[in-house]
Image (cartoon, grey):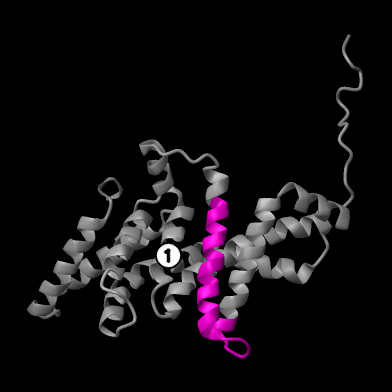
Amino acid sequence: MADTTSGTDSTPTVPKGLPALKQQVMQDKIKIAQWLLRCITIFFTLIFLIPIVGNPFESYYKILLSCTATNLLRLHQRLPRITFTREFLQLLFLEDSFHYLFYTFVFQYTAPVTLVIIPVFLFALLHAASYSLTLLDCLGQNSWWGARLLISLVEFQSRNILKLCALCEILIMPLTVSLIFSGRAGLFTPIVYYQFLQLRLSSRRNPFTRNVFIELTNIFDSVAMKPSVPEFLRRIVRSIVDVMRRITPVHQQ
């Protein structure tokens, strides 16, 4: 016999406020941990950029460490079961969280560089803002309107923020070469970072690095074609364009 009350939800509705927030924390422990780590990343970035209190040098490596922990948790969410197979490694290399895990390992052994932490900070800001809205919704739709306004501003600029992250990732490549000559990085840093850039260009979830890279390639190409550009400079620019086109994923051209 059918239950005549089957249309009624038997799960008790938790009222908005601290009870709902507590339930959210208990249900999404990993996401809460990621949110806290991203807030820590933002905090230490501000200390690094505005060294009023604390040690900026130590803050730099704490930013990278918190980013490492965040991406390890994200990888655990995406690939909970570790298997020593070729298929697992292929999936691992496709994950954006693995890309930035790789990124933080590259710069753990170099001198602090502001440009390096910019994409880390911006990604932390975007994701922290997104989940902060979820937590605020638990407290009620009309709670913390000031924080909601700031979050809406971040989300409104999300596309520009992602483009800026992509641009930073690309500009860091020639920067790693210059760091060698200044003694702030090892000889293998550009080689290892090039592998990271290749992963970003091939990302299946975040096309911004690839798109910005192609845009830059087209800009350099158009500059090289201008009649006012000297011949020796045109050859240099065209050489750069050829290199950029060779490392751009073929299936995206």
* Image side of residue 220 versus residue 49, left or right: left
In the rendered image, residue 240, in percent from the top left (x then y), is placed at 19, 68
Q: Quadrant of residue 88?
A: top left
In the rendered image, residue 203, in percent from the top left (x then y), is placed at 39, 51
Residue at 56% in and 52% down:
74
Magenta region includes residue 52: yes
In front of the other: 239 or 60: 60
Q: Quadrant of residue 232?
A: bottom left
Q: Tag 1: residue type? A: Phe
Residue farthest front in this picture? 84
Residue bearing the label numbered 1: 105
Span colored in magenta: 47-74
Indicate whether 212 appears above or below 205. Answer: below
In front of the other: 214 or 52: 52
Indicate whether 232 appears above or below 200. Answer: below
Check disc 1 and report its element: helix, strand or loop: helix
Residue farthest top in this picture? 1
* Image side of residue 146 versus residue 221, left or right: right
